[in-house]
Amino acid sequence: MYAIVEMAGQQFKVAKDQKVYVHRLQEEEGKKVVFDKVLLLEDGGNVTIGAPVIEGAAVEAKVVKHLKGDKVIVFKKKRRKGYRKKNGHRQYLTEIVVEGIVAKGAKKAAPAKAKADEKPAAEPKKAEAKKAAAPKKEAPKAAEDLSSKTVAELRDMAKAKDITGYSSMKKAELIEALSK
């Protein structure tokens, strides 16, 4: 039994107990990982092809260790110009061991149901938020009136309300102090 599965943006042909090096995964060493993007599944001559993935199929693997790949030398040169650039690169990799291939019954549908449950709950909150926002619209009108005034007018208003330190306040600070 083997499967072609997408792991970390690349496609691999994997079988049980096979060691695979993939681009660095976020999981810690020793943790189990489930890859549910199975593109093709072969089980004793019976081949199943996904469109684009096979629903319910998954590949279970265990993270063995994180490592760096071999150094790749990038050398650029333009002849007769004296131009030479040498650069090196080592790719971060994760070594995983495939523990099993599940043809049916992988747990992919559970997170989708959780998202579906959250959406109806979010809509009433939005309606409540709109109701709560309606009274707040009146308060910004007073702030808009203050913002249309000059700094000198705002300082006069602050002096009339006995606000201390108004002479060194900026326009935004004056508006905030007056709206309290």
Image: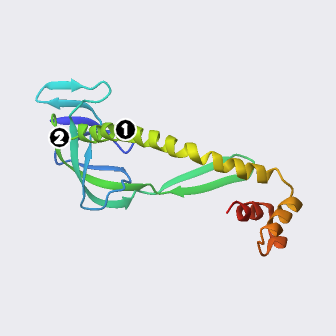
In whole angstroms, how far apart are the C-alphas of marks 1 and 2? 33 Å
Q: Amino acid at mark 2?
A: Ile
Q: Secondary structure at mark 1?
A: helix
Residue that carries the numbered disc 2 in the rendered image? 101
Q: Amino acid at mark 1?
A: Lys
Total numbered badges shown on the rendered structure? 2
Between disc 1 and disc 2, whose residue precedes? 2
**Which residue reaches farthest right?**
152
Identify which residue is drawn at 44% across, 54% down: 91
Q: Is residue 52 above or below residue 121?
A: above
**Which residue reaches farthest left?**
44
Can you tell which quarter of the image residue 151 is in?
Answer: bottom right
**Which residue reaches farthest bottom?**
164
Residue that carries the numbered disc 1 in the rendered image? 119
Q: Is residue 151 above or below residue 22?
A: below
**Which residue reaches farthest front?**
160
Position of 27 with respect to 143 (left or right) is left
Q: Residues within 10 Å of mark 2 (few under 14, many from 20)?
A: many
Q: Which sits in the foreground, 104 or 157? A: 157
Specify the label residue 92 is tagged with.
Answer: none
Q: Position of residue 41 (x, y in %)?
A: 21, 31
Q: Which sits in the foreground, 126 or 27? A: 126
- Quarter of the image for the C terminus: give it: bottom right
